[in-house]
Image (cartoon, rainbow, N blue to C red):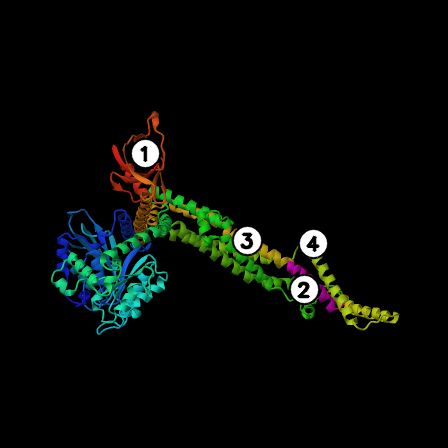
Amino acid sequence: MSSDDAEDSSASPATAVAEDNNTGEASSIEQGIQRDVRPWLNLVDDLSNLTHDTEISVPQICVMGDQSSGKSSVLESLSGIPFPRGSGLVTRCPIRLSMKRTAAGSAWIAHAHTSSSPGDVKRAETPAHLTALMEALTDTLTSNFSTESINVKVTAPGVPDLTVVDLPGIIRTSTAGQDPRMIQQVNALIDSFLMQERTIILCVIPANQDIATVDILERALKVDPSGERTIGVLTKPDLIGPGNEDEVMAVLLNVRKPLQLGYTMLRNRTQKELAAGASAAEAKRLEQEFFKAHPHFKSCDPKLFGIDNLTSRLTQLLVTRIQAELVPMKAEVESALASVRAELKTLSGYGAARGPAERQKLLVTITQEYVRHLTSVVQGEYRDRVIVVHPQLRLYTRALGVFEELRGKVEDTAPPFSDENFVQILAAQMDSLRGRELPGFMSAQSFYMFMAQYVEAWREPARAAAAEVRALTLEVASRLLEVLVVQYPALREAVRGVARRVLEEAHGSALQALDDLLRKEKDPFTVNDFLEQHINKLRYDRFETAVAAAFQELQGKATADKAGWAAAKENVGQALRRWYRATHGVNSASNAEDMSAILEAYWLLAAKRFVDNACMTLDKVVMGDVARRMQEECYRFVQDDERLSRFFEEDGKLLARKHELTERRDRLSKASAAMANIQVRNGRARPVRVTVTAGQLGLGLSLAEDGGRVVVKGFRPMPDGHRNPGQEAGVKLGDVLEQVEGHRLGSFQEAIERLKRSRGTVVLTLLRERG
């Protein structure tokens, strides 16, 4: 039986492994971790716990391969912890094993829970109990497969500081009773881990199979083409068929299917050895003897074989990746932290009001803040940060779009003055309106009637613009409430109701004002010389057109002799005389021609004037007065404490969100501090312990947050000539405050709170740059 066939058997090795732990044998990976490595591994473990793998991805070891490829055996050899074994899909969900080494002589303790029930933590006190617990938790998640994970944390003297992840094996074909969708689900899960650029991929490959058909290598190549995070692990070397040794050797020596990080070959305990109670030390001896005695492998570099060599390479790679990713991870944490703080600030902008006086004061404060911002957006002043980051609040800019649309719609109502038949139609209309006017005189009444018809066409565009400005102002007023008054939905709705009423009244007033404008425009009047200038221009333009037409008619007929020139003058003269009689004679056509010029000039003047006046009316009546009116209406709530009590009841969902964000902020702050501290520790900083006796004004330290660290930026002056306690005790500018009374600080806020509570003598642990 192969050394890795143990994973294909239903017998459990828990007993044997438990005996290994009871005899105090250390896991092999612990032997490869040096003192200067552990802080980095601890950092990743802390980050994983603090960020819940949602804010950032952290470097981790994921063991991947086909079903029954020997994955669990490899994990057991790496960690010293037994994973569930059996046939088929044994690992039915991701299992994240986080190990923390404790002092010698301390108890072996494990805690496990599913990702869906983090509060339901199970405890195990032996490796055998942990194996059974993992199997039971898997059964509670699913009978087939689940994307939810099982999180296991082990604290014991004989385990390394490391986190490893066991993933379900790749399924090539579904078996009886399996959900056909399981293959896709398992593949999607594995791909999600593969694509995480900080994941170290352990490709577990049975040596007795054709390496060219191994799926996990192809998948790893797609996401890690440079091969900087992929290691191949060859298992089951004792099952290599006769004649296939050279092919396996080519893979092991990185000639065939080469990987940048190469391959390592392992021989794990067989089922027979497990049943016989072979210890980890015995398994290691048997592994060494197997490779030394093998006719093909004995001549190879010994570093290519054994769990110790794999552990050493894996540890070095993991630490290297952690160090390389520290700066990007810190940037990601800082970005997430800034986002959380910004959202938390919007949810906690005004605090809580608990009594009538506080509620009245808070209402006035919120109203003033709201009116100030509303006034700014109405006036088109966008300097405030709230308006800068919310461009949809820029009311006046958006209103200008409505005004421009109104101008376009009014221009579209212009009569077709330039059409060839316009004058003829106008002449017919003038004839139908003719009264007692003498021949040669135009009817002023006709002019008034025509303009009244033209002006009426402006009514609908103007009313539509009024409705749009009203809707736009209400939208901005409501959106501004959502931005400024996040935590009080009842107050938001009440003020929104005030905005509706105020704008409804303003809209009615605006419509009345627009009707007044239209009424005035229907009674033509102007003292603007634009009218006569434009009438003269139109007449001159028409004369120019007539002259051009006359010469166009002559083109090609004239000759250079005197007779030809005389004929040309006669032809042009006849054309101009015909034009003059048609446009300036005493007849309907000439009257219509003059009326057309006057109508066109006055329409242009009146249309421009109406658009300007209509826009100014909407600006002043709808938008301009809304802030003042809303302030007056909101102040009426001040004396109604019953309503104020309802207004300042915080939304339950928002309270839950604030709690969630607060917890997330604290986790991210601690993660940032952890990364900052390890940067300092591994730089030129050294720890310094200082004992400070607090004075009347505390420790006298001026602190600031710098990249997640709590830094001493100065010393506060003391009264009556007293010396500063912190400075007297030896605290220096630039010191990083790491611990207060032995408690490691997770955030700047926590540091402030602990120092405020400090009385008497306080022990500070500082990180100080080496001189």
Q: Is residue 595 magenta?
A: yes
Q: Mark 1 to mark 2: distance in Å?
A: 96 Å
Front-most of 672 and 458?
672
Against 723, residue 522 (above or below) is below
Left or right: where does residue 578 sit relative to residue 755?
right
- For marks 4 and 3 on the same chain, the one whose residue lies earlier in the sequence: 4
Q: Are marks 2 and 3 in contact (CB under 8 Å)?
A: no
Q: Amino acid at mark 1?
A: Val
Q: Label 1 near label 3: C-beta < 8 Å?
A: no
Q: Give the vertical position of 65 relative to 40 (above or below).
A: below
Q: 306 left or right of 704?
A: left
Position of residue 46 measured from the top left corner of the image (x, y, whole percent): 27, 50
Secondary structure type for disc 4? loop
Q: From which residue to which does the magenta span run? A: 585-604
Disc 4 to disc 3, how far (Cα)?
25 Å
Q: Amino acid at mark 3?
A: Thr
Residue 716 can be seen in this image = yes
| Residue 121 inside the magenta-drawn segment | no
Q: Mark 1 and mark 4: span between their CA atoms?
A: 83 Å
| Residue 284, quarter of picture | bottom left
Residue placed under numbered mark 1 in the picture: 731
Q: Which residue lies at the image location 16% right of the left edge and 64% below the top edge? A: 270
Question: Residue beneath label 2, please?
Answer: 446
Q: Dot 1 lies on which element?
A: loop
Instruction: Answer with left or right where residue 336 lies relative to residue 558.
Output: left
- Of the two numbered discs 1 and 4 on the same chain, state the one appearing first in sequence: 4
Q: Earlier in the sequence, mark 3 or mark 1?
A: 3
According to the picture, the residue beneath numbered tag 3 turns out to be: 617
Q: CA distance from mark 3 to mark 1?
A: 67 Å
